[in-house]
Image: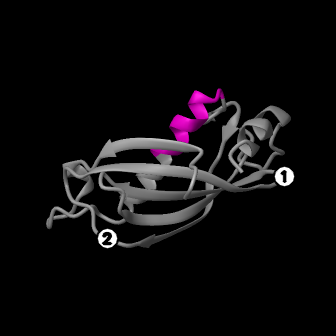
Amino acid sequence: MDSPLHRHARTVAFGDTDASGWMHFPNVFHYFEQAEHEFLRQNGLLVFARDQGGWPRVKVSCDFKRPLHVGDAIEVHLAISRVGASSVTWDFEVLTSSGELAAFGSVTTVRVNHEGRPQLISEAERAVLERGR
């Protein structure tokens, strides 16, 4: 990812690993989600509210290139590859502190209302999200 929309630094926590000390694979999506929520908040966009809805996941994928261990410093890079009428497809990379690619993938979210039904992405939301394309 040449120029990520957002970067999120963190460390692999002990609780994110299995008995071997390696990061347990589904935690890559927790790391993505932390980066996504940080980006949304920093840009004044809704993350979730019972009376307004949110952005549930409808499709996820990830390829793993190398294991991550407890204590590893990592950085999650985000980009947006598609903004639809009510959906956003995020691309992400997880890199080690030396810049080595550990995992990459995509997550598609859908903007829903408080009843969980898809709703159109507002013009204000779209303006922020399309900056990342």
Residue that numbered label 2 is attached to: 66
Secondary structure character of the magenta stretch overall: helix
In this picture, which residue range is highlighted in magenta? 34-44
Look at the image and say whether residue 109 sits in the magenta stretch. no
Q: Does residue 47 sit above or below 108 in this rendering?
A: above
Look at the image and say whether residue 39 sits in the magenta stretch. yes
- Which label is found at residue 85? 1
Q: Quadrant of the rendered structure where residue 98 is?
A: bottom left
Q: Quadrant of the rendered structure where residue 58 is?
A: bottom right
The residue at the point 54 percent across, 42 percent down is: 6
The residue at the point 44 percent across, 42 percent down is: 8
The residue at the point 79 percent across, 37 percent down is: 127
The front one of 118 and 27 is 27
Amino acid residing under circle 2: Arg
Q: Residues within 10 Å of mark 1 (few under 14, many from 20)?
A: some
Q: Does residue 105 sit above or below 70 in this rendering?
A: below
Secondary structure type for disc 2: loop
Across and down, in percent, residue 42 comes to: 57, 28
In the rendered structure, the answer to whether residue 44 lies left or right of residue 31 reads right
Quadrant in which the N terminus is drawn: bottom right
Across and down, in percent, residue 26 comes to: 39, 62
The residue at the point 84 percent across, 52 percent down is: 85
Q: Earlier in the sequence, mark 1 or mark 2?
A: 2
Secondary structure type for disc 1: loop
Across and down, in percent, residue 64 comes to: 39, 72
Q: Quadrant of the rendered structure where residue 45 is?
A: top right
Q: Does residue 23 sit above or below 74 in this rendering?
A: below
Amino acid residing under circle 1: Ala
Tag in front: 1 or 2: 2
Q: Residues within 10 Å of mark 2 (few under 14, many from 20)?
A: few
- Which label is found at residue 63? none
